[in-house]
Image: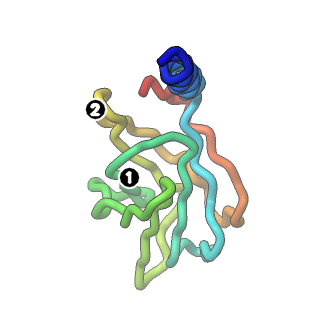
Amino acid sequence: MASSSSFLLAMAALAALFAVGLCGNTVTLTVGKGTTSTYTHLVLVANVPIHELAIREKGAAEFLDDMKESPAMTFTQDSKAPLKAPLSVRFSVKGGGYRNRDEIFPAGLKPGSVIKTDIKFEG
């Protein structure tokens, strides 16, 4: 009985450390493989769990429909025409509502580029 209690206590401690490790992280978005230079195909990978990621083109009043979310915090957007950069982003964080950052994606980012949003993740 003592060994199962010790195991449960150890697992709880690890879960707490993981949760604390996520708290306070700045949300970053990495441009994923397959992204085209004109953003007709855009892949973004978040470093923390976010939801409902959407982009807005330069000069547009409204955000485009939410990007398609895949497992592992990966989001994709396909467009028939090149998107006008710089792009703005909007996403939701669990329990924290929507966050916007205007014009943080300049034109021509290459896969592997990392964009810092300056938004702290408080999950």
> In the visual, does 47 lie left or right of 52?
right
* Res 23 visible: no
Q: Quadrant of the C terminus?
A: top left
Please tell me which residue is depicted at 31% across the width and 62% down the height of the picture: 64
108 or 90, nearer to the observer: 90
Relative to residue 104, is residue 110 drawn left or right? right
Residue tagged 1? 53
Residue nearest the observer in this picture, 79 or 76: 76
Gap in angstroms between the C-alphas marked 1 and 2: 12 Å
User: In the rendered image, which quarter is residue 47 located in?
Assistant: top right
The residue pinned by badge 2 equals 97
Amino acid type at mark 2: Gly
Question: Quadrant of residue 57 in the image?
Answer: bottom left
Residue situated furthest bottom in the rendering: 80
Q: Nearer the viewer, residue 85 or 40?
A: 40
In the depicted structure, whether residue 7 falls above or below residue 78? above
How many residues crowd mark 1 within 10 Å: few (<14), some (14–19), many (20+)? many
Q: Amino acid at mark 1?
A: Leu
Front-lying residue, 44 or 57: 44
